[in-house]
């Protein structure tokens, strides 16, 4: 599902709710068959959130960060090397995060999210700061062909529509529409950002 909307529409808040990082003020959510917030504990290990911040320690190396997250999630260490190779970070794995570019940090964050092989990916601008070759490298892992259920927040409606089976438009914290990409008229999308 692609989530579209202007700045401040509630896209990131929605992802945080789905990831159990925020509690709803009213109503309920269901994620992977679990009611939130009552069953937050049952969802946390099955959801991977790629947020604006990489959620990694800047003083640690890429590998040290991933080892820490692997240990916290009960993930075998060999998965770290597999992911580093896939995203093109194997040669930079022993460098502290503070020395890496924003694009390399994004690749490291993608590895962190994918370590426990989550059932649901919550992706907030996942291709931000990635050059074309990096985007091609991560596409099989987090893109349409990954086989994962994904909620994708994007400020690029055209790219998001190509990634989605369903589109949610948000305006000031409320759903403006929920439809299939082929059912959307360009004027509806323009109006969402007006």
Image (tube, rainbow, N blue to C red):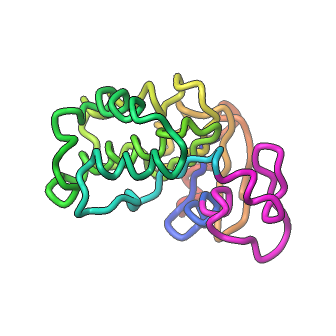
Which of these two is toward me, 16 or 63? 63
Q: Judge whether 93 appears above or below 25 on screen.
A: above
| Above or below, comparing residue 3 to residue 52 in the picture | above
Q: Can you name the residue that lies furthest to the bottom here? A: 25
When asked about the image quadrant of residue 179, the answer is top right
171 and 138: which is toward the camera: 138
Which range is magenta? 16-44
**Up/down of 51 relative to 66, above or below:** below
User: In what quadrant of the picture does the N terminus appear?
Assistant: top right
Q: Is residue 36 above or below residue 25?
A: above
Q: Is residue 115 left or right of residue 106?
A: right
| Residue found at x 19% / y 55% | 96
Residue in the foreground of this view, choosing between 190 and 132:
132
- Residue 68 covered by magenta stretch: no
Residue 67 in percent (x, y) is at: 37, 46
Residue 81 percent across, percent down from the top left:
33, 31
Magenta-drawn stretch contains 18:
yes
Picture residue at 64% right of the left edge, 35% below the top: 149
Residue 182 left/right relative to 86 = right
- Between 125 and 70, the one lying in front of the other is 70
User: Residue 22 falls in which quadrant of the image?
Assistant: bottom right
Q: Quadrant of residue 79?
A: top left
Q: Residue at x 53, y 60 (%)?
A: 193
């Amino acid at each position: 599902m692609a989530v579209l909307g202007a700045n401040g529409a509630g896209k990131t808040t929605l992802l945080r709710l789905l990831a159990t990082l925020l509690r709803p003020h009213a109503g309920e959510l269901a994620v992977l068959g679990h009611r939130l917030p009552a069953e937050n504990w049952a969802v946390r290990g099955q959801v991977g959130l790629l947020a604006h911040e990489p959620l990694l320690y800047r003083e640690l190396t890429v590998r040290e960060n991933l080892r820490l997250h692997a240990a916290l999630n009960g993930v075998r260490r060999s998965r770290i090397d597999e992911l580093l190779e896939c995203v093109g970070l194997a040669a930079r794995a022993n460098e502290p995060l503070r020395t890496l570019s924003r694009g390399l940090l994004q690749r490291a964050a993608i590895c962190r999210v994918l370590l426990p092989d989550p059932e649901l990916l919550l992706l907030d601008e996942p291709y931000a700061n990635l050059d074309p070759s990096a985007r091609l490298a991560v596409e099989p892992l987090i893109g349409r062909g990954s086989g994962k259920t994904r909620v994708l927040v994007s400020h690029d409606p055209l790219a998001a529509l190509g990634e989605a089976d369903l589109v949610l438009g948000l305006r000031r914290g409320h759903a403006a529409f929920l439809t299939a990409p082929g059912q959307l008229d360009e004027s509806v999308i323009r109006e969402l950002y007006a």
